[in-house]
Amino acid sequence: RKEVEQDPGPFNVPEGATVAFNCTYSNSASQSFFWYRQDCRKEPKLLMSVYSSGNEDGRFTAQLNRASQYISLLIRDSKLSDSATYLCVVNRANQGGKLIFGQGTELSVKP
Amino acid sequence: NAGVTQTPKFQVLKTGQSMTLQCAQDMNHNSMYWYRQDPGMGLRLIYYSASEGTTDKGEVPNGYNVSRLNKREFSLRLESAAPSQTSVYFCASSEKGSYGYTFGSGTRLTVV
């Protein structure tokens, strides 16, 4: 079983749609959680951190459920520019700053 | 622009050849990392350096060596390249552990 699992997609949605991505992680001692965005053939970039209370950044909302070991990302009012691969990322507990990346979920927003 | 610089951007090697991928950061970060990215596999950690003078193995270290030359530079060496090492390689750095990874733009390596 992979340490961080995501639905690879692709998710094809029209502009203006709301889309949700889910992620599960296997190490219950994991402490830090993130969503990264990766454009085609580019490097990953931090989109947002994920906090236990849930957090929002404009059209993006991230939530964490520690009991279920589940992380989500909600994108409202999708834009063409949101087309990218979204990576669920978890720190490996008790091993400093090393991050474990999910394989990513591909999103394609169509006009 | 401040950030992480990787060289080269593209490379084709023959099986058995050696090469070194270079990475340098100008953000005064303590930690540096090398990942490889393959289709359907996500990013996998090869080696990391928590601070200058230290290096440790990640998930997939076989076939690679690293050198933390100084605080700025962290190089990855392939001693005898194999087709299985065809991948995109990313270097990253961070100030405090898992927060705020900054990635380089990647090296696309093909081993034939």
Image (tube, coloured by chain):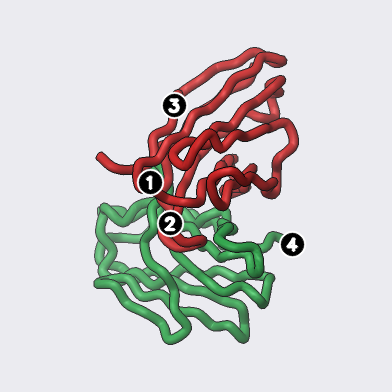
Q: Position of residue A62 (x, y in %)?
A: 41, 75
Q: Position of residue A35 (x, y in %)?
A: 44, 63
Amino acid type of the residue tagged 2 in the rendering = Glu
- Tell which chain the image draws in red: B
Label number found at residue B95 = 2
Element carrying mark 1: loop
User: Which label sits in the foreground, 2 or 4?
Assistant: 2
- Tell which chain the image draws in green: A
Which of marks 2 and 3 precedes in the sequence? 3
Amino acid type of the residue tagged 3 in the rendering = Thr
Label number found at residue B7 = 3
Residue under mark 2: which chain is it in? B
Give the residue at x 60% y 34%.
B67
The residue to which callout 4 is attached is: A1
Label 4–label 3 contact, CB within 8 A? no
Which of marks 1 and 4 precedes in the sequence? 4
Q: Do tags 3 and 1 sit on the same chain? A: no
Task: Judge left or right: residue A42 versus residue B43.
Answer: left
| Inter-mark Cα distance, 3 to 1 | 20 Å
The residue to which callout 1 is attached is: A39
Residue under mark 3: which chain is it in? B
Label 3–label 1 contact, CB within 8 A? no
**Mark 2 residue crowding within 10 angstroms, few (<14) / some (14–19) / many (20+):** some
